[in-house]
């Protein structure tokens, strides 16, 4: 909120004189709220933003079919025109550089199985969010079904510790020295924290997990024209420069991140990407595999 939402809110209001009110919420609560409003026939929110909320609401017919004029690559825009990406999240391992001196960190996912990391790896688990099941999906996509499940069983036997906290809070635990590393961290957050003096860094393990944070307009939006204007602003160069300034990863091809290494280039650093629809369809299965192997 402090890094991006408020600066974007102020910039938009200065430019267009349109008031913006925002609510920060997790995906399940946001989807439930919009669904309940639709059932009551009284929409209160104009725009929803997140990695999987749009897919769930699209499936229920609760979104308006609209994307603004843009310069984004096609993979960042819904082919059915129900969502458009605002920013990119890249999930990679993150570690405490005081506990794990640079040069000694694991380089591959197989390295996480080294006995020296037994009981020292932690990640965030449901119900706080679905990052652990998404890691399951990443491993299955990268290694294949049989080898992927075999790897996950070995990781579970390694004593990985689960915490029901947000991804940001997981990094905070790593920075505080509770654990030396975590396999699923927002890679840009380690750089933001390192810039403030924290002992944090990320590991460009191949592949990383790429997630799109997308925005959509609700079907019962009470201010549809203002919502369309805000959507256009968010994906414009101006809006995307605010995204980059906040330390997040922009999706506009003309706006680089503060640290270009963070955004996968497909060569030095690759990522597996899942669209909101793919996440929505696959997460129930990944969650069942996660429960079966890690609980």
Image (cartoon, rainbow, N blue to C red):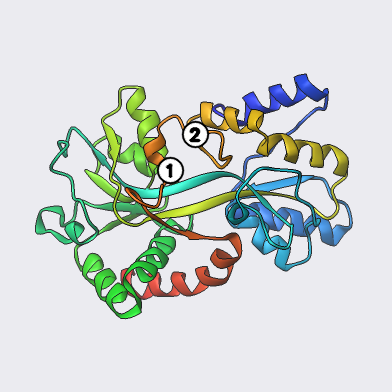
Q: Which residue is drawn at 44% across and 74% down?
A: 288
Relative to 202, 168 lies left or right: right
Q: Which residue is drawn at 84% across and 50% down?
A: 43
Query: Local crowd at mark 1 within 10 Å, few (<14), some, or many (≥20)?
Result: many
Location of residue 117 with respect to 175 vertically, above or below: below
Horizontal and vertical percent position of residue 14: 76, 19
Q: Which sits in the foreground, 281 or 233? A: 233
Horizontal and vertical percent position of residue 215: 68, 48
Identify the element where label 1 is drawn.
loop
Residue underneath mark 1: 263
The quadrant where residue 252 appears? top right
Residue underneath mark 2: 256
Pointer 2 with pointer 1, Cβ within 8 A = yes
Horizontal and vertical percent position of residue 258: 44, 29
Query: Local crowd at mark 2 within 10 Å, few (<14), some, or many (≥20)?
Result: some
The quadrant where residue 176 appears? top left
Q: Which sits in the foreground, 43 or 52? A: 52
Name of the residue lying farthest toward the top? 14
Q: Residue at x 25, y 46 (%)?
A: 181
């Amino acid at each position: 909120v402090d890094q991006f939402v408020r600066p974007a809110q102020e910039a938009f209001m200065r430019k267009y004189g349109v008031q913006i009110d925002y609510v920060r919420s997790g995906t399940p609560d946001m989807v439930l709220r919009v669904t309940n409003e639709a059932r009551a026939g009284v929409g209160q929110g104009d725009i929803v933003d997140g990695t999987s909320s749009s897919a769930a609401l699209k499936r229920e017919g609760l979104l308006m079919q609209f994307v603004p004029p843009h310069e984004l690559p096609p993979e960042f825009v819904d082919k059915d025109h129900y969502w458009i990406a605002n920013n990119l999240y890249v999930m990679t391992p993150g570690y405490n550089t005081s506990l794990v001196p640079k040069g000694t960190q694991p380089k591959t996912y197989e390295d996480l199985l080294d006995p020296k990391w037994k009981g020292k790896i932690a990640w965030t688990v449901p119900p706080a969010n679905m990052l652990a099941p998404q890691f399951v999906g990443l491993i299955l996509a990268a290694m294949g079904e049989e080898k992927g499940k075999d790897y996950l069983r070995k990781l579970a036997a390694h004593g990985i510790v689960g915490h029901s906290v947000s991804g940001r809070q997981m990094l905070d635990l790593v920075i505080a020295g509770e654990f030396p590393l975590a396999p699923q961290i927002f890679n840009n957050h380690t750089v933001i924290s390192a810039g403030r003096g924290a002992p944090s860094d990320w590991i460009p393990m191949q592949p990383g997990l790429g997630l799109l944070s997308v925005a959509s307009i609700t079907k019962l939006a009470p201010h549809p024209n203002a919502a369309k204007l805000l959507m256009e602003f968010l994906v414009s160069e101006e809006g995307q420069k605010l995204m980059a300034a906040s330390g997040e990863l922009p999706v506009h091809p003309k706006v680089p991140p503060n640290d270009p290494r963070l955004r996968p280039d497909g060569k030095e650093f690759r990522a597996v990407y899942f669209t909101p629809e793919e996440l929505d369809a696959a997460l129930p299965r990944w969650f069942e595999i996660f429960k079966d192997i890690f609980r």
